[in-house]
Image: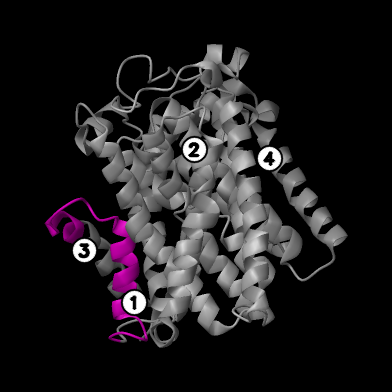
Amino acid sequence: MNGLQALLVVTLVAALAPMIVAALPGPGLPQVVVLILAGVLIGPQGLGLASTTGIRLLSDVGLGFLFLLAGYELDLRLLRAHAGRLAMIGWAISAVIAVGTVAILGSFGFLHAFVPIGLALTTTALGTLLPILHDNNMLSGQFGRYVLAAGAVGELFPIVAISLFLTGRGEFVAIGSILAVCVIAIVLTLIPRIIGPARVRAIFRQGRRATSQTTLRWSIVLLLLLLVAAGRFGLDVVLGAMLAGMVLRSWTHGIEIDVTPLEGKLDAVGYGLFIPIFFVASGMALDVKSIIQDPLRLIVFFLLLLVVRGLPSLLVYRRALPLRQRVEMTFITATTMPLLIALAAIGLSTGAMIPANAAALVGAGVLSVLFYPLIAVAVARRGRTVPAGPAGTDAAEPGGVVGAARAAGEPSADWENDPADDRSASPPSGNQHPTAGPAADLPPGPGL
């Protein structure tokens, strides 16, 4: 099958996925799971209708888009606030537990790739979670800031660690490469200042026309530029993609203009085309035979994601969130997948990870996306006094998934002056929804 035919099958699956989700009874199944399972079905180990060979480039761009959107939602001021400090403490606890866990499993001969698997157990799939959390109104108010901070740390820190320890080069060379790519990103953030805010605003306004789409085109150029730069310096491309999102945020942060149209376009291009292709291709590449031959490995990794990455939330947020929301955080932070695919590929390419563990690790990520967010959503719904559905969320957040996440992570002016105010505020009671009431939806800060 040639690349065009494979692309036709993959895009057909992507178009059918939301219809399948809508037709299924019960709580909404994440589309990500449907896309992955459909990829397994049409892939070489299923019906053999398509292969990843012809769509690999588009799949890589989809992975880049996923992390660009995650980087766009990352506000570094949030990491300096109380929510960010708690997120970093939680990740550090997860890293310590991961070291002990892989050491124990290694002593029994269960695994040999200590670093890739250890890092995999500390990741959180913020980009994958965003549509699920947005559709269930779980990104607003104080709880949304904690979720975004925990997710950002759970993606950014492992990405940096991958670039440092898994590139096959010396640590000093790896540090130099990271610094070089970061310098490129910093230089790119200065472009609006060099051009001038007035000209940038004019470009944004002119770029809204359907025939020009200037801002969207430059966003894609920015993404591909930093993907290429990261690849040239021997770094994992997800670092370049996340930096691209952070640069894009800085471009829109310093000018007084409505960025809702741009965010809607990023939603449309990312979630409408490239990101579904990445998830379908991930399912097509999943080694189902290895999982079937040794299902115990998948179960072990699936439970370890919850123990290592999720359970520390019960302790870390004990003074910031009520028990119900801490349980939600436990299952949200334990949800991961895109980085598991990257880590499994690195482990296989270096020969450090056996194929059975690579397949089980990715399979555990798929299961985490299938079960853990649904449990978190079920817990959130049980605690709501007034149900809120996707329709209300979409009406309140015209910018879509990207706009909702940005609004949730954007601190107010008062919060910037006193970044510990969310720590001193009394947490909501167990039967009060975190986003209910006018005080929960804080106004966006002056940056955007």
Q: Could you classify mark 4 by the number of other residues whose Cα lies within 10 Å: few (under 14), some (14-19), or many (20 or more)?
A: some
Residue named by callout 2: 148
Left or right: residue 277 versus residue 251 is left
The residue under label 2 is which amino acid type? Answer: Leu
Separation of residues labelled 1 and 4 (CA atoms) = 39 Å
**Numbered circle sitting on residue 188:** 4
**Numbered circle sitting on residue 16:** 3
Highlighted range, magenta: 19-47
Left or right: residue 256 versus residue 230 is left
The residue under label 4 is which amino acid type? Answer: Leu
Separation of residues labelled 1 and 3 (CA atoms) = 15 Å
Q: Could you classify mark 3 by the number of other residues whose Cα lies within 10 Å: few (under 14), some (14-19), or many (20 or more)?
A: some
How far across and how far down the image is residue 205, in percent? 44, 28
Q: Secondary structure at mark 4?
A: helix
- Tell us which disc is closer to us: 1 or 2: 2
Sequence-first disc among 2 and 4: 2
Residue named by callout 1: 40
Separation of residues labelled 2 and 3 (CA atoms) = 30 Å
